């Protein structure tokens, strides 16, 4: 088993349900060949390669992170890019911080703009730089639109779904929809069209009822099963954010999502960055539905990794102050101060993992929800999101406080600024 060209990374290895204090990952040809304890590596013939690497008890070794919901970073907004090279700079901002697989997310815009942006981002997917596209809107609730331009919201259109799938060259992976919007559910609707083109509906930005959410979840669950889709289960786009709040007499969509996740029919996204959700909310959802039904996401926008200031998110202007991004509100005629809706995140996914751990989520659970769970949603189990033999050699090494020290993708070091 000795391979003179093997890559060896040693440290505290974070496994799906435990931490191996003296662990090691061995990779060759861009693929993982071994991941486990050093003692097991020595016993199975990896001694010559492993023994040359000293122990690193102050570091963690994680799988590369997988982000299902990401609008950009490093000053680059995916909903505004006009070239693949421009978009790649935003991808690299997150990759340098340990996110080795992501979906590039668009926001609500005019159909012709969405098609142009999808075509640009598809170039990155074809090149293997991203895993595909997530389109957030335009079939969303006006009342719960958040940072989405109200002028571009529309009723569900299966034709637009099929046009987007074509523009994305088969890499449309997920789309956020509100179940109460006409044309989203039912025969011939958006949900049906998404499954037909190999994409996953994601419930979000909704003011709908529990029953409307349940109807969408049931339709999508049945459709995915009938299609034999490798994707799934369906997701809830940033649970709690952009949704009618949970109320004991009007439970709304959140109750339906939590129940579906608890029975394994849904994965709920959480933007656990310390801004979008209270720490207790994050911890409670993990306790209620389990880490295998939670995907930690960033909902990052151009300001991720950047200083406070003014940024664009599609057609909306965003102001970032103290790391919190908000839509620039229209002036109030009365002169009263106005505060715009939160407009995405400014964190990297490893920051979200760190916040989840600080909230009381066990480290293996938080890591699993940022790696294996989103990989499963994308139908990429065994390819990304794990360090099992045969997986892509995507590795994140952090210090004891989960600050990135080294990132590998396909077994190659990712350049850091």
Image: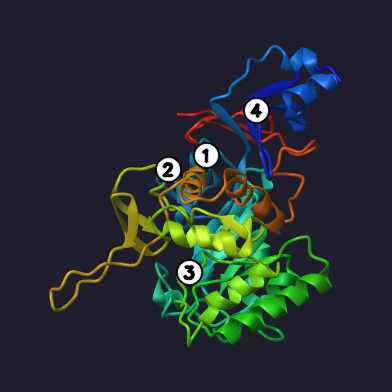
Residue at x 40% of width, y 70% of height: 146
Q: In the picture provided, is 61 more to the left or to the right than 391?
A: left
- 168 or 240, which is in the foreground? 240
Does the residue at mark 1 contact the one at mark 2 (Cβ under 8 Å)? yes
Q: Residues within 10 Å of mark 4 (few under 14, many from 20)?
A: some
How far apart marks 1 and 2 lie (CA) works out to 8 Å
Q: CA distance from mark 1 to mark 4?
A: 14 Å
Q: Quadrant of the N terminus?
A: top right
Identify the image quadrant of residue 48: top right
Kindly report the distance in space between the C-alpha atoms of the residues bearing marks 3 and 4: 38 Å
Q: Nearer the viewer, mark 3 or mark 2?
A: 3
Q: Residues within 10 Å of mark 3 (few under 14, many from 20)?
A: many
Q: Quadrant of residue 326?
A: bottom left
Residue 298 appears in the picture as rendered? yes
Q: Position of residue 227 (x, y in %)?
A: 82, 70
Mark positioned earlier in the residue sequence (4 or 2):
2
Q: Which residue is mark 2?
A: 74
- Give the side of residue 137 with respect to residue 35, left or right: left
Q: Which residue is mark 3?
A: 240
Q: Position of residue 400 (x, y in %)?
A: 50, 31
**Along the line of sight, which residue is nearer the eye, 141 or 164?**
141
- Residue depicted at 52% across the width and 39% down the height: 92
């Amino acid at each position: 088993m000795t391979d003179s060209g093997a890559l060896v990374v040693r440290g505290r290895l974070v496994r799906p349900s435990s931490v191996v204090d003296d662990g090691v990952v061995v990779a060759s040809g861009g693929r993982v060949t071994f991941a486990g304890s050093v003692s097991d590596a020595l016993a199975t013939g990896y001694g010559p390669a492993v023994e040359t690497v000293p122990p690193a008890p102050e570091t963690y070794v994680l799988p590369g992170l997988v982000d299902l919901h990401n609008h950009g970073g490093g000053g680059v907004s995916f909903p505004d890019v006009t070239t693949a090279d421009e978009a790649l700079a935003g991808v690299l901002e997150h990759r340098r911080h340990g996110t080795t697989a992501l979906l590039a997310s668009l926001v609500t815009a005019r159909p012709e703009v969405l098609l142009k942006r999808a075509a640009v981002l598809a170039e990155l997917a074809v090149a293997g730089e991203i895993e595909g596209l997530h389109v957030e809107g335009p079939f969303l609730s006006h009342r719960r639109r958040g940072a989405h331009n109200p002028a571009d919201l529309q009723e569900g259109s299966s034709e637009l779904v099929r046009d987007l799938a074509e523009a994305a060259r088969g890499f449309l992976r997920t789309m956020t929809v509100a179940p109460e919007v006409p044309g989203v559910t039912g025969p011939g609707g958006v949900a049906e069209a998404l499954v037909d083109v190999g994409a996953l509906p994601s419930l979000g930005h909704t003011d709908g009822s529990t029953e409307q959410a349940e109807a969408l979840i049931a339709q999508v669950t049945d459709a995915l099963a009938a299609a034999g889709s490798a994707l799934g289960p369906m997701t809830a786009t940033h649970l709690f954010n952009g949704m009618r709040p949970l109320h004991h007499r009007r439970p709304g969509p959140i109750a339906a999502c939590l129940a579906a996740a608890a029975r394994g029919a849904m994965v709920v996204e959480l933007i656990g960055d310390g801004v979008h959700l209270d720490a207790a909310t994050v911890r409670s959802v993990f306790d209620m539905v389990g880490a295998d039904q939670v995907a930690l996401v960033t909902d990052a926008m151009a300001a991720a990794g950047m200083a406070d200031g003014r940024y664009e998110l599609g057609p909306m202007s965003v102001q970032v102050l103290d790391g919190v991004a908000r839509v620039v509100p229209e002036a109030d005629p009365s002169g009263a101060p106005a505060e715009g809706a939160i407009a995405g995140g400014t964190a990297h996914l490893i920051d979200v993992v760190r916040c989840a751990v600080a909230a009381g989520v066990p480290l293996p659970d938080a890591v699993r929800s940022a790696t294996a769970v989103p990989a499963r949603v994308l139908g990429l189990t065994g390819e990304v999101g794990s360090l099992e033999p045969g997986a892509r050699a995507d590795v994140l090494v952090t210090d004891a406080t989960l600050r990135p020290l080294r990132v590998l993708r396909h077994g190659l070091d990712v350049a850091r600024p």
